[in-house]
Image: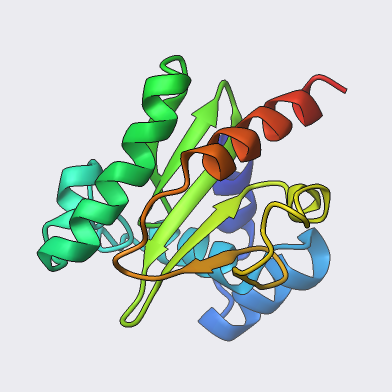
Amino acid sequence: MSYWFLVMKEIADLKYPQQIAFLKQEHGFSQAHANALVMYSRGSKSSRRFDDLDGYLRGHDGVKSETMKKIFGVIQKKYPKLELVIAWNQPMFKLGDEYLFGASILKNHILIAPWNASILLAMKEDLEGYKVNKKTIQVPIDWKVDEGVLIKMIKLNIQSLKR
């Protein structure tokens, strides 16, 4: 991060849109990541809204919260060495420095995401019946958590890191 803070010092005189464009065009940042770095470098403390899963779930109704607890509980039980973190204001699992899995609560559904989108292709048959997007899987708010799908997703993701 210290490198990026130095980069931001070099472009501190630019306006927000110019800083965002610079990070996206010159360094391949996504809009969200560029925004997070720019806002942080400008002193914003609002970029981090939650400290843990409970904090993330606090703003959601019971059914959504319970489904998310089950999703993360299944994975944590099988892979206790994974670290549950909040990144980009979403709960995620990491193994060392690598992100493996994340999930988001939306108004009408929950999105789950293996960090490596190629996992979705490898699990095509397992995911029949689910709404699969480019990098995420949409599940109902009251999803009967499919432990097999989650465990396989994490297993394949860990294997992909070893290659």
Quadrant for the C terminus, please.
top right
Residue in the image at 41% along x and 66% along y:
39
Relative height, residue 3 to residue 121 (above, below): above
Left or right, 67 with reference to 137: left
**Quick check: 89 left or right of 135?**
left
Observer-nearest residue: 84 or 49? 84
* Residue drawn at (59%, 77%) of the image: 14
Q: Is residue 72 above or below residue 15?
A: above
Q: Colour scheme of this structure image?
A: rainbow
Q: Residue visible at 26% across and 45% down?
A: 69
User: Whole-percent x and y of residue 25?
Assistant: 80, 72
Whole-percent x, y for residue 1 in the image: 55, 38
Q: Position of residue 117 (x, y in %)?
A: 74, 54
Position of residue 103 relative to residue 135, above or below, is: above
Rendered image quadrant of residue 3: top right
The quarter of the displayed image where residue 158 is located: top right
Locate residue 64 relative to residue 81 in the image: left or right: left
Question: Can residue 105 be seen?
Answer: yes
From where the camera sits, is residue 12 visible? no
- At 29% from the left and 65% from the top, the residue drawn is 142
Residue 52: give x, y in percent of width and height: 23, 41
Q: Residue 20 occupies which quadrant of the picture?
A: bottom right
Q: In the figure, is residue 90 to the left or right of 79?
A: left
